[in-house]
Amino acid sequence: MSVKTYWTTNASVLIEPHVIRERIAELGRQITLDNQGKSLVLIGVLKGAAIFMADLIREIHLPIEFDFVAISSYGADTKSSGIVRLIKDSDISLQDRHVIVVEDIVDTGLTLRYLLEVLQSRQPTSLKVCALLNKPSQRSTPIQIDYCGFELLDQFVVGYGLDINERYRNLPYIGVLEESETGK
Ligand code: IMP
Ligand code: MG
């Protein structure tokens, strides 16, 4: 058996690519089973969820449409500011549709709380949440995650779409940074 090596970073591997892949296949199976006979609209939150979205939609065996929104909340910091703003909207009408919001990670929940309120006002038939990662210990507003990939402790993670100051999004695994890198 060969030992997999990745290009050099200060991030140590927390979740291996094949583990991510298997979990996403399970999430896709569950979403497919739960929504038989329906068509779905998946709304991803840029930029973090782009990679997760690309893999997830290929594991859902239903008619789907997908689009992205962008929200600003963190700026270049690693802590949620609580100030959120929709900076790119979706072109797809959500009225009377079954909508699933696709997020990379739910931390304080402030970003998602805001987005869910905005999307709910468009009168979808149903509005659910699929998040690859969940940090429940950091929650400051209650959020129901209908489909969750992995639960994390209070760790700042990067890779597979997640960044710090826009870096590391292209790591094929989820990694944890050395403390010095997160500025904590
Ligand atoms: P929330 O509003 O605190 O739930 O923040 C959610 C957003 O913060 C996510 O969509 C990420 O962009 C970012 N975020 C939260 N935790 C992490 C992390 O550990 N690594 C990278 N980004 C994170
Ligand atoms: Mg970010």
Image: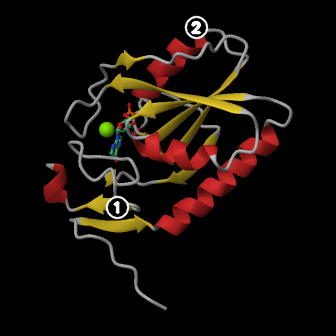
Q: Earlier in the sequence, mark 2 or mark 1?
A: 2
* Secondary structure category for the residue under label 2: loop
Judge left or right: residue 181 versus residue 31: left
Q: Which residue is mark 1?
A: 175
Q: Amino acid at mark 1?
A: Gly
CA gap between label 2 and label 1 equals: 36 Å
Q: Residue at x 61, y 12 (%)?
A: 93
Q: Residue 121: which disc?
A: 2
Judge left or right: residue 176 versus residue 62: left
Name the quadrant containing residue 73: top left
In the rendered view, tell whether residue 171 sits above or below residue 120.
below
* Secondary structure category for the residue under label 1: strand
Tags 2 and 1 in contact by the CB under 8 Å rule? no
The image quadrant in which ligand 1 is located? top left
Judge left or right: residue 95 versus residue 53: right
Percent of width and height locating residue 181: 16, 55
Percent of width and height locating residue 160: 41, 53
Out of 12 and 32, give the one closest to the viewer: 32
